[in-house]
Image (cartoon, helix red, strand yellow):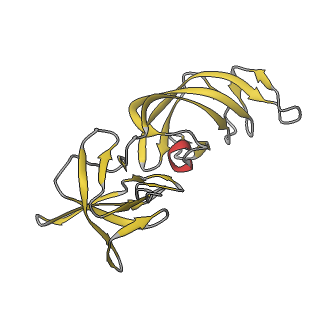
Amino acid sequence: EAAEPASRSADGLFRMPVQYVNRPDHTFRGYAGTIESGSVAVGDGIVNASAGTEAKIARIVTMDGDLASAGRDTPVTLVLDREIDVSRGDVLSSRPTPELASQLDAWIVWMDETRLYRGRAYELVLGTKSTIGTVTDIATRLDVDTLSEVPVRELALNEIGRATISLSHPVACERYDTNRALGGFVLVDRVTRNTVGA
């Protein structure tokens, strides 16, 4: 039986949101982050899921020195064999890449005294990416006693509801049951900076 490629290990496809672009001088450019799923090895091809550009892993740098391969939950700095456009918030991945979405349909738990209404804009943070999300629809609220969905137009403190959020910039994302890091997000009030939903 053939060995499973490093980018398709048992814990999923390789996914690493870029937290920091490390360029101390003209001789080094690395992309720092924590591997959220899968694994990667020197020589593997990767893709910037946001831009679709490809490169190969030249080095995997850690505080303890270079590694030949690295897996889930490992903080690394990846050095590529060529320069491609990668910024904080982008997702480096194996193929198939995460979906790029400009609209999200999601269950939201509301955590603020001020009710959630349609038309309100919040900072949406997904992985290391931050963008503006506007709530365009609130369809239902989950009745926690019966687990049935009740049609509503707003959510109150501690209510869970299904909502649609339109984004100012597309984000690389996946279903929560596939990848928690790329499937979960928080909503932040743009004035108070409080986390108001997730």
- The answer to whether residue 40 is left or right of residue 198 is left
Vertical comparison of 37 with 112: above or below: below
- What is the x, y in percent for residue 87? 28, 49
| Residue 162 versus residue 193 in the image, above or below | above
The image shows residue 102, relative to residue 25, as above or below, that is above
- The image quadrant that residue 110 belongs to is top right
**116 or 59, which lies in front?**
59
> Front-most of 194 and 73?
73
Outermost residue on the front side: it is 1
Please state if 39 lies on the left or on the right of 107 as rendered: left
Q: Dividing the picture into quarters, in which one does residue 56 lie? A: bottom left
Q: Is residue 160 left or right of residue 85?
A: right
The mark total stands at 0
Residue at image x 30%, y 62%?
78
The structure residue drawn at horizontal position 26% and vertical position 48%, both measured from the top left corner, is: 86
Residue in front for this viewpoint, 173 or 95: 95
Residue 161 in the figure: left or right of residue 94? right
Where does the image place residue 71, in percent across and percent down from the top left? 45, 64
Looking at this rendering, what residue extends furthest in the right direction? Answer: 145
Q: Position of residue 54 (x, y in %)?
A: 25, 45
- Residue extending furthest toward the bottom: 64
Residue found at the very far left of the displayed protein = 26
Q: Quadrant of the C terminus?
A: top right
The x and y percentages for residue 84 are 20, 48
Residue depicted at x 73% and y 20% = 152
